[in-house]
Amino acid sequence: MLVCGYNECFQLGIGHRFDKNRPEPTRDEDIVSVCCGEYYTLILKVDGTLYRHGIFYTNRPYESNKSGQVDKDKEIEMICGGRCHVFIKKRNREIYGAGMNNRGQLGLGD
């Protein structure tokens, strides 16, 4: 996978936080899908594992700027998201949403 762009929050997953004006390869392999937000990147691999790079808003600040594997049960089928939210569909058809909901992005009815 090749990446480029703003990288202040390590969202490109290339091991440093310098912006890239030209595409640079990552170490990620066997990728099925990529979902990008303002400061994060989620990567779904062939085996159903999910990885992230950059800042993703959580209720646990110590986890917000970590890179690495997010889901270990290998049951994720699809990912999509926006600026500060994501949706994950598992193989059993369950859908999970996470992130900011200040404008109803997560569809919770509040």
Image: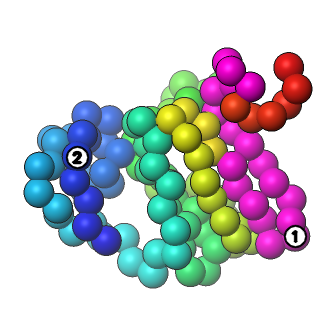
Residue 19 percent coordinates (x, y): 16, 42
Q: Residue 56: x percent and y percent?
A: 52, 36
* Mark toward the start of the polypeptide (2 vs 1): 2
In this view, the mark in front (2 or 1): 2
For residue 82, side relative to residue 106 (left or right): left
Point out the stretch of residues depicted in magenta: 87-104
Is any atom of residue 65 visible in this view? no
Residue wearing tag 1: 92
Q: Secondary structure at mark 1?
A: loop
Q: Callout 2 environment at 10 Å: few (<14), some (14 to 19), or many (20+)? A: some
Inspect the image, locate mark 1, and give the three-letter code of the amino acid beneath it. Asn
Q: Secondary structure at mark 2?
A: strand
Q: Is residue 28 left or right of residue 17?
A: right
Q: Give the Cα distance between marks 2 and 1.
A: 35 Å
Residue at the image position 52 percent from the left and 75 percent from the top: 32
Look at the image and tell me whether residue 105 can be seen: yes
Q: Which residue has dot 2 on it?
A: 5
The residue depicted at 26 percent of the width and 67 percent of the height is 2
Answer whether residue 44 is magenta in the image. Answer: no
Residue drawn at x 70%, y 70% as measured from the top left: 77
Q: Is residue 100 magenta?
A: yes
Q: Where is the N terminus found, in terms of image quarters?
A: bottom left
